[in-house]
Amino acid sequence: MNSNALLIRALRGPLTLILVGTLFAIDHTGALSFTKTWPVIIIFLGVVKLAERSMAGTTQGGAQ
Amino acid sequence: MRRGSIVGPLILIVIGLIFLLRNFLPEFRMMDLLSLYWPWLLIAWGGLRVVEVLNWHQKGQLVPRGGMNGGEWALVIFICLFGSGMYAARNANLFRAGGLNLPNWEILGERFDFSVTGTQPGVGKTPRVLIDNPRGSARVIGVDAEEIRVTGTKTIRALTLDDAQKENKSTNFEIVRSGDQIIVRTNLERASNARQVQAELEILVPKGSSIESRGRFGDVDVENIDGTVEISSDNAGVRMSNIGGDARVDLRKSDLVRILNARGNVDIKGRGQDIELENIAGVAAVNGQYSGEMKFRNLTKPFRFESQNTSLRIDRIEGEVELMQGRLHGRKLIGPIQINSKSKDIELSDFTGSVEIDVDRGDVQLRPARTALGKITARTRSGNAELVLPAGAKLDLKAEVKRGHIENDYGAPFRVNEDGRSATVSGSTGGPEVRVDVDRGEIRLRKWTNEDTATPPAAPTAPARPPAAPKAPLEITKQ
């Protein structure tokens, strides 16, 4: 596995955390309830997985 | 080997700072702030970790799989649960202004009841009575007698009966004469822990008494008193009925102020929720911030209401006025009427005399009585205005919309003149001046329909309604 895929995998956790925090913050403003917006997290995880796959597929591993 | 994350030490520093702030600044409301802004902690944490990961990656250090480990996720879930719980609790008003209000009244120690009795004979027919009960409710009833008689219960929370008895002794109930004043005093402030003691009193006084009550917490009921009644408290529901003199109420907080059948002036000040005034023969004035429903029925002298956003003057209320957040309904009113508000929908029906309305935002509906119209000036900066007139009404109308349009369902002799975005309607049948101004909205003119003519006389008049029972009847138990 190249280092870009590793980077994305490492960013997955913190980004999920930011997303969860944002959804709760939105919930507290009263605009959209977290009980409605939570599927966004699943979509996000799916997108990250996809990105990992496509990164793993590329042969060149530019670290920068 | 990579170094550990910077987040751990940062969390410790932040927690320390928060507690330090709380200890040194009494107005720093930690629970309030945390319950509102905890999601930002997650966002900040995530942001920090992103920077760290990028940094590690650039230096070619080993990056943790997934970016976060299991223990960190567990902490995140804990924060989410705790945070949403706190947020829900805050919205359910468990936290009051000023921080966490622990219900220590119920959870500490055991409850001991002591009976409270006292009599003061020979006070004459018209004594001045001062009731000084800091915590707990008081019910004052005027009777045909020349003595003051107090019964009630003092409730003390304590760990042992001994402690409770000591506390009971130090908060000795007394009735004392001081000049021409009789003071009924529970002395609860002398208790070593004042929050653990409260007294529920029932006080019978001569009908002609004047009453003054001071407290910090607890409802006050007053019935059948011919003198003046004055109540001040930090937090109380107040109910009065059949008051002969003036009634003055000054509260920092209240769920309800209800005054029925008062022959004198009524003056209510402070903050609270609901207000109900009915059958008031004197001048009535309400001043302050009230978030609930306000009902005013049958006020025979001028009435004045003043809050931050609304001011209201009505010469007489024969029917009723209902006032709440966002709307004002009035029925059977006698002018001059004056209403100023930032934001309210106003609906007046069956009124006579002059009317002056000025609202920033809100609809205005006016349905004057069939009898002679008074001078009317109504203005709303944003909202619709509707004027409902009986057939053959005598008036000199001039209405104008700056942006919007006018609908004339009344017909002749009123004529609509549209000019680009603005419009006017005018016409005269020879009567008082009626001016309606709308900056942005719509004006509608129409005749009374059957519905309009049927409702006002059919509605029952206010005085028929019997006074409702006090919300929380007092129970006197002796032990």
Image: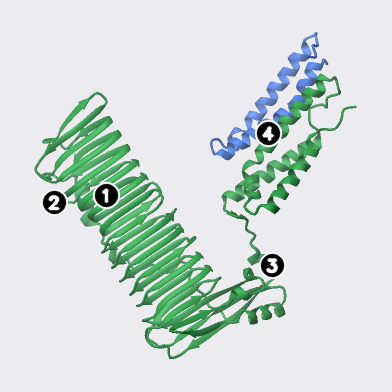
Chain colours: A blue, B green
Query: Marks 1/3: CA distance?
Result: 53 Å
Amino acid on which the number 3 mark rests in the picture: Leu
Q: Which residue is mark 4?
A: B43
* Badge 3 and badge 2 in a common chain: yes
Q: Amino acid at mark 1?
A: Leu
Q: Earlier in the sequence, mark 4 or mark 1?
A: 4
Q: Nearer the N terminus, badge 3 or badge 2?
A: 3
Image spot of residue B388 (x, y percent): 21, 43
Residue B427: x and y, percent? Answer: 13, 36
- Chain bearing tag 4 is B
Of badges 4 and 3, nearer the viewer stands: 4
Instruction: Please determine whether, in this image, residue A17 is positioned above or below residue B429.
Output: above
Q: Quadrant of residue B395?
A: top left
Q: How many marks?
A: 4
Q: Which mark is residue B108?
A: 3
**Residue neighbourhood size for the residue with mark 3, other residues' Cα within 10 Å, grouped as few (<14), some (14–19), many (≥20):** few
The answer to whether tags 1 and 2 share a subunit is yes
Disc 4 from disc 1: Cα separation: 51 Å
Q: Chain of mark 1?
A: B
Given residues B27 and B36, the one toward you in this image is: B27
Query: Seen from this angle, which residue lies furthest right?
Result: B1
- Residue labelled with disc 1: B348
Secondary structure found at label 1: strand
Q: Secondary structure at mark 2?
A: loop
Mark sitting on residue B208? none
